[in-house]
Structure formats: C-alpha cells, structure tokens
Amino acid sequence: MKPGATDSRRLKTDPLEVHLVFGPSGVGKSTVGAFAALRRNWLHLEIDRFGAAERGLEGGINHYDLRAPWNRFWEALDSRQLTAELAARTRAAARDHCILTFPSDVVPEPGHLTDPAVQLHVLYGTAADCLRAFLDREARLARGIDECHWRTHNAESYIRFSLPYIQHHRIRAFLVNGQHRPSALVVAEMRRAVGRRLEY
C-alpha cells in the first residue's frame, strides 16, 4: 500500500451480515458463495461438500463445528449463538460479511424467515433450468450423477421452495436464456434485500 493510501475495508461501517443461501441443486449456490469470498471479501462456509463422506464426516457434510448453534437456530428458532459464532469467525478472518450455502434438501420453515439477525435467500429457477444446470455441472465433473439423482433428491424440496411463504426470499438464479445470472448481480440483490423483507 502506498504511503497515505487507505485500505477501504478499515473504514467499512456497514454492520456485519450473515447470509444463509438455500435452493435446489443446480441453481449455483456454491458458485455465488465462492464469488462472494473471492471478489467481495466474505467468509464462505459451504455446508454441503461433495466427498465429505469419504473423509469420515458426519452424514457426508462438513458442519464446521457449528452443529450445536445451528441446531439451536433450526430447531428452537434462536439464532443468537449461531450469529455470534459466525460474526467472531468472520472478524477473525478479516472478512466483511459471512455466507453459508446449504444442501438442496435443507428448506427453511416460516419461523426461520422472520429472524432479522440472519438473511435467508433461496436461489430459484424453473425445474427445467435447475435440472439443465445440474446435468451440465455433473458432465463437467464426471461424477456419474444423472437426472434420476436430481429428481429423487430435489422433487420434494423444489416444491417446498416454490411455496408462497418463501416468495419474498427467492432470488432469480437464471437469465431468460437458461444461463446462470452473473454472481455479482445475485450478491448485489442479496445485499439489497437486507432489512427490506421485514416489511412483509
């Protein structure tokens, strides 16, 4: 840094935000989380990690030692321990905000959507767009996962993500041509939603 220059992050006065991102498989949750980490200086914890089962992690998912505070939020609708822990980790990592991305079968209930301490977002698109993106991803990764897997593991959760109570938390994940929206636009929309949803 040149003499007299100022690191803009040191002057940042925005309150620390905790964003929880849900959605069907294929909508681009991991991509958005990675963009937020690499380009927006956010802490990204990807709760859904392929291959975690082979590493001996519970249920094939890495919970980053957040199981107890997460259960308190998810089951008792008390986010205080979770947000305090995530805020501490975000500051320790010198990051501006925090984003968690979740497996496609984790769907928030109405009670989770009313907590002002956490920002819940559902990346969403048509079933056809989600499936097409899922198959494109699996073809690139050559993991041998096919359309039957998506339909088996996403059919019920996709219907739940489509319910009216989630309407104000959905963020469009695809362009009209079926391609993913740029992650910069999705992250910007997530930030604009902070506080606004309390009006509903």
Image (tube, rainbow, N blue to C red):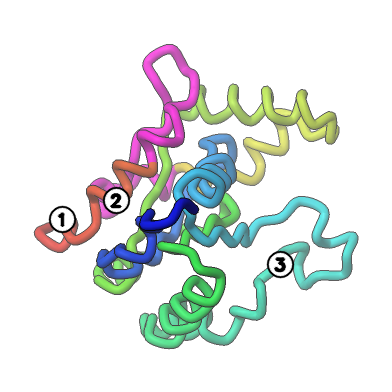
Query: What is the spatial separation of the Cα atoms under label 3 and label 2, in whole angstroms?
Result: 26 Å
Q: Where does residue 61 sit, x and y in percent of width and height?
A: 72, 64
Tell me which amino acid carries mark 2: Arg
Question: Is the residue under label 1 in contact with that under label 3 (CB below 8 Å)?
Answer: no
Which mark is on residue 10? Answer: none
Q: Mark 2 — residue? A: 191
CB atoms at circles 3 and 2 under 8 Å apart?
no
Tell me what residue is drawn at x 56 percent, y 47 percent.
Answer: 38
**Which numbered marker is on residue 62?**
3
Residue at 54%, 55% in the rendered image: 101
Examine the rendered structure and indicate whether residue 185 appears above or below residue 70: above
Question: Quick check: 197 above or below 168?
Answer: below
Relative depth, front residue between 77 and 84: 84
- Which comes before the other along the chain, label 3 or label 1? 3
The residue singled out by tag 1 in the image is 196
48 with respect to 164 (left or right): right
**Mark 2 nearby-residue class (10 Å; few <14, some 14–19, many ≥20):** some
Q: Which secondary structure, mark 3?
A: loop
Residue 21 in the image, given as x and y percentages of width and height: 45, 54
Q: Which residue range is magenta in the image? A: 159-186
